[in-house]
Image: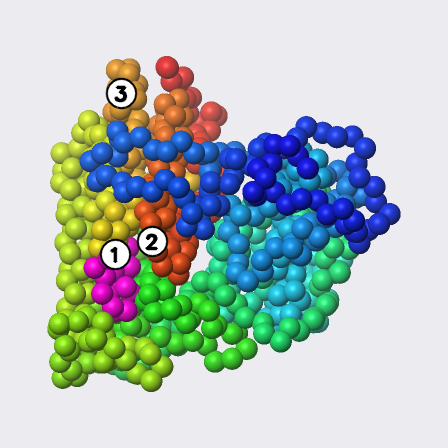
């Protein structure tokens, strides 16, 4: 065993371990030992609620000065850890050892990414292999952790995910759709071989990459297990959204991250593709069950929970009187990730024992939340969608959810009115969640809620005081949002680049965090008293919201496929962002003059100004500083979650941190910025 491994964490090698591929030999050359596990163990311990150091963090005013516990930078480059062994013999050996390793793990609950990294390091330590294979080892351990559940999933509930790079690089006749490559089965590559057999068995087959589309399909309820082929880089990005959600997955790594003429061990696909081995109790236990429940509020139960009044028919919806309601309902029902309703449902579920999380079975009737809880969750989405309509108007944004914004398609006045209508719908949904004429015992929140529960232990109608508490928190969130948005707009009336990072973080805390806070509070309050969580909810959501907004700023420089198709739109619109503040803080006099020209000289083409600004941000390390701020927000939110006694709620908070601040792209934001052609416009050299 590697002498650097911590005794309490590393498993001893079994004296007579047999492997499936007995003809393979241990590698003769012993490479350097992997790094010590001490860097990985604290994260895993902390996620299990066993962190030794627990503390509360200060308000946002202290964010720039307060020291943080020294911890490994989570998002540092991991490219050196994603190497696939060059020989088939070594790959088969690691695979066999990974199977033995996984058989001794606790399969009673899903693992997280940190735990998987720790397992991979342990396995490599036992085999005396270098850490560069840790990504490969992690994938294989994950495969065998989930193998039984994957094989027990019926073919028609599985998805085969194939990468673009398996297609024939030249002359491929297939076209791309919103769901990826539409294979023509021409026989020029191996995609058709896998696709034909998988579809014969009943698989859904997708030729695409990236976790967002995969998660969308999973949450939509179409599949319960995934067989994926991808490079280690893509698999690492997908694991946060797929494995943490608790979906059984089996992955076959490509031999390299080269997007052309790559290869794989084809036998690894065929050995699981057509196998079905049912288990007596096959259940999904991850948050995908709650995500699906949140989706069903809008996809299946929308008309029942929020009946139309003036647009019940196509004819009435087309009239001037029905148009506002019709557009509002369609805007509320479609688009977005519905993450805030998910937070409310998941918090309620965690505080009431986790029935949805624990008892979900895709082969039986799906778990449904009480209508009162469902309506409150929908109300949060209504308030959120209203804020987006108004925000798009105030910022004159071009796109939302991959479509033109409402004020561009329907006009400024109607869009303002639609946003106001959505606010009214939010109030209406909360009011409808109350019990008709029910008078709760106000001496005990829990007794009042117990009295409103139905036979299944779920709240049918909210006590009036609970509904009022939820409404009060929604109103507070709305006011804070307006304060933050107002601060941004008044700054734009008299813009100055003398804008500090603290100024930016204060605006972010007002604009983004309150919606998360209202969603989390509502779920917990509907389940009972929140007195013991009052000091947690606000600070936790503030750190999550700030991290989310900074990440959104980074995405703006890439060109967000969902909302901001134009990279650098925030800079063009002269919005006060953390990027601007960090750059101004670090710049010298000459660099500040260049910043002012980039932001205020509107005579130059946008591409020129953005290219200069991008290069200046690179020189000043702005992107790296922003990433560190995201990590700081992540760390502080997780430290707060450490102190939560409830296992269900603590794990939910960890999941929210991982999901809200998950960067779905590995691209450097500088790589996708508009670059002017030197044939058209000469770009002057920026001075240091």
Label 1 near label 3: C-beta < 8 Å?
Answer: no
Mark found first going from the N terminus, 3 or 2: 3
Q: Position of residue 288 (x, y in %)?
A: 46, 64
Question: Which segment did they paint magenta?
Answer: 515-533
Tag shown at residue 644? 2
Q: Position of residue 273 (x, y in %)?
A: 71, 63
- In depth, the one of 251 and 648 nearer the eye is 648
Instruction: Give the Cα separation between the discs numbered 3 and 1.
Output: 45 Å
Q: Position of residue 291 (x, y in %)?
A: 42, 65
Q: Position of residue 584 (x, y in %)?
A: 27, 25
Label 1 near label 2: C-beta < 8 Å?
Answer: yes
Along the horizontal axis of the image, is 134 left or right of 54?
Answer: right
Mark 3 Cα within 10 Å, few/some/many (few <14, many 20+)?
some
Q: Nearer the viewer, mark 3 or mark 1?
A: 1
Instruction: Give the Cα separation between the discs numbered 2 and 1.
Output: 8 Å
- In depth, the one of 615 and 582 nearer the eye is 582
Residue on which the image places disc 3: 592
Along the horizontal axis of the image, is 119 left or right of 668?
Answer: right
């Amino acid at each position: 065993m590697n002498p650097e491994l911590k005794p309490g964490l590393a498993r001893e090698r079994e004296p007579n371990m047999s492997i499936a591929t007995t003809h393979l030999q241990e590698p003769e050359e012993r490479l350097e030992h992997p790094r010590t596990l001490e860097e990985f163990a604290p994260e895993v311990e902390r996620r299990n609620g066993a962190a030794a150091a627990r503390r509360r963090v200060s308000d946002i005013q202290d964010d720039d000065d307060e020291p943080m516990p020294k911890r490994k930078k989570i998002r540092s480059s991991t490219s050196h850890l994603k190497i696939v062994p060059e020989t088939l013999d070594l790959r088969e050996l690691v695979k066999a050892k990974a199977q033995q390793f996984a058989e001794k793990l606790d399969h009673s609950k899903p693992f997280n990414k940190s735990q998987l990294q720790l397992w991979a390091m342990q396995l490599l330590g036992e085999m005396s292999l270098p850490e560069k294979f840790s990504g490969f080892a992690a994938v294989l351990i994950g495969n065998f952790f989930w193998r039984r559940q994957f094989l027990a999933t019926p073919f028609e509930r599985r998805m085969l995910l194939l990468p673009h790079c398996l297609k024939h690089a030249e002359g491929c006749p297939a076209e791309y759709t919103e769901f990826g490559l539409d294979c023509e089965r021409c026989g020029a590559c191996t995609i058709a071989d896998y696709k034909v057999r998988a579809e014969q068995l009943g698989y859904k087959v997708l030729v695409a990459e990236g976790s967002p589309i995969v998660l969308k399909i999973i949450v939509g309820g179409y599949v319960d297990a995934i067989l994926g082929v991808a490079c280690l880089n893509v698999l690492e990005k997908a694991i946060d959204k797929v494995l943490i959600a608790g979906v059984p997955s089996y992955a076959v790594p490509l031999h390299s991250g080269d997007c052309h003429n790559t290869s794989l061990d084809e036998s690894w696909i065929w050995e699981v593709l057509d196998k079905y081995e049912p288990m007596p109790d096959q259940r999904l236990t991850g948050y995908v069950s709650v995500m699906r429940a949140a989706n069903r509020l809008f996809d299946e139960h929308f008309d029942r929970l929020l009946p139309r009044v003036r647009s019940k028919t196509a004819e009435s919806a087309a009239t001037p009187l029905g148009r506002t309601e019709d557009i509002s309902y369609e805007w509320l029902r479609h688009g977005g990730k519905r993450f805030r309703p998910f937070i409310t449902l998941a918090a309620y579920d965690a505080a009431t024992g986790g029935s949805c999380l624990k008892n979900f079975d895709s082969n039986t009737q799906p778990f449904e939340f009480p209508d009162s809880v469902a309506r409150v969750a929908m109300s949060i989405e209504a308030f959120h969608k209203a804020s987006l309509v108004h925000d798009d108007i105030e910022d004159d944004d071009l796109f939302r959810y991959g479509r033109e914004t409402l004020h561009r398609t329907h006009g400024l006045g109607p869009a303002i009115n639609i946003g106001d209508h959505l606010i009214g719908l939010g109030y209406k949904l909360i009011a409808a969640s109350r019990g008709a004429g029910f008078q709760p015992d106000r001496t005990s929140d829990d007794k009042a809620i117990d009295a409103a529960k139905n036979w299944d232990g779920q709240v049918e109608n909210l006590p009036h005081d609970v509904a009022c508490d939820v409404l009060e928190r929604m109103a507070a969130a709305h006011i804070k949002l307006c304060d933050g948005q107002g601060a941004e707009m008044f700054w734009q009336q008299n813009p100055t680049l003398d804008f500090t990072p603290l100024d930016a973080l204060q605006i972010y805390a007002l604009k983004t965090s309150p919606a998360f806070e209202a969603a989390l509070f509502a779920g917990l309050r509907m389940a009972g008293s929140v007195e013991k969580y009052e000091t947690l909810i606000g600070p936790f959501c503030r750190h999550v919201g700030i991290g989310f907004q900074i990440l959104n700023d980074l995405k703006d420089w890439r060109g967000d496929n969902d909302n901001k198709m134009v990279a650098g739109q925030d800079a063009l619109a002269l919005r006060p962002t953390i990027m601007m503040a960090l750059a101004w803080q670090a710049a010298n006099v000459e660099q500040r003059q260049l910043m002012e020209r980039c932001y205020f000289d509107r005579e130059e083409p946008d591409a020129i100004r953005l290219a200069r600004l991008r290069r200046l941000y690179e020189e000043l390390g702005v992107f790296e500083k922003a990433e560190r701020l995201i990590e700081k927000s992540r760390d502080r939110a997780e430290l707060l979650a450490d102190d939560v006694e409830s296992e269900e709620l603590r794990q939910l908070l960890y999941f929210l941190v991982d999901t809200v601040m998950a960067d779905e792209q590995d691209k450097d934001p500088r790589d996708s910025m508009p670059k002017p052609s030197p044939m058209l416009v000469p770009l002057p050299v920026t001075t240091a």
